[in-house]
Image: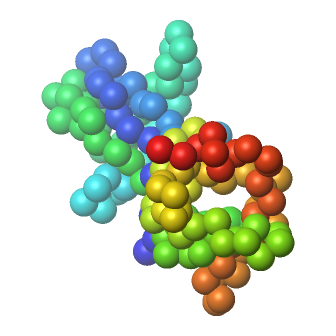
Amino acid sequence: MDLVRVGKIIKPHGVRGEVVFLPTTDEPEKRLKKGAVLFDENGAPYTVKGKRSFQSQILLSLSQVDGREKAEAMRGQELFAQAEPSDERGIYFKDLPGLLIEGEDGEKIGTVTGVIDNPQILLEVKREEGRCLIPWAKDFIKQVDLKSGKIIMNLPTGLLSACSY
């Protein structure tokens, strides 16, 4: 079963087992709805009983967490959901490392070495000149061909010099 990270439990809230949750998914309404099943790092399932906003935070109630002690034990845990069959392009981020990135003109940009999955998805790219971070943005991506091991991108002028480290 392929899992995708949906967020992290920050701390307990109250005495009934609610937790403060920091979502990292771009689909919190879908992933955190009542009845959704989430998994911890060990694959243990947790069913969402409820979700509510409190100040600027999200509070989650999980059916298997019924008191403050259990909520405290969950502090810092990341939660995952079952991956959809594919994203809109049929691509999982775990498949991207190792792919060659080329410009539309055939110029070799570099090789994906990792994916940073934050609110903005970034590709870590090894280039001849060093390393850089390239945003995974619909406007930049022209084609992803997993079979040939390539991503064709149209990057704005100056991005590569600005993103290098």
Among the 4 quarters of the image, the one containing residue 9:
top left
- The answer to whether residue 29 is left or right of residue 66 is right
- The answer to whether residue 10 is left or right of residue 29 is left
Asked whether 134 or 68 is in front, the reply is 134
Q: Is residue 152 above or below residue 58?
A: below
In the picture, the quarter occupied by the N terminus is bottom left
Q: Residue furthest front?
A: 129
Q: Is residue 147 above or below residue 109?
A: below
Q: Is residue 23 above or below residue 154?
A: above
Q: Is residue 147 visible?
A: yes
Residue 33 on image: x %, y %: 58, 42
Count of all numbered marks drawn on residues in the image: 0
Q: Residue at x 38, y 48 (%)?
A: 79
Q: Is residue 30 visible?
A: no
Q: How is the image coloured?
A: rainbow
Residue 80 on image: x %, y %: 42, 54
Q: Residue furthest top?
A: 55
Q: Residue at x 25, y 60 (%)?
A: 42
Asked whether 135 or 87 is in front, the reply is 135
Q: Is residue 6 above or below residue 61?
A: below
Residue 50 on image: x %, y %: 50, 34
Asked whether 100 or 79 is in front, the reply is 100
Asked whether 134 or 1 is in front, the reply is 134
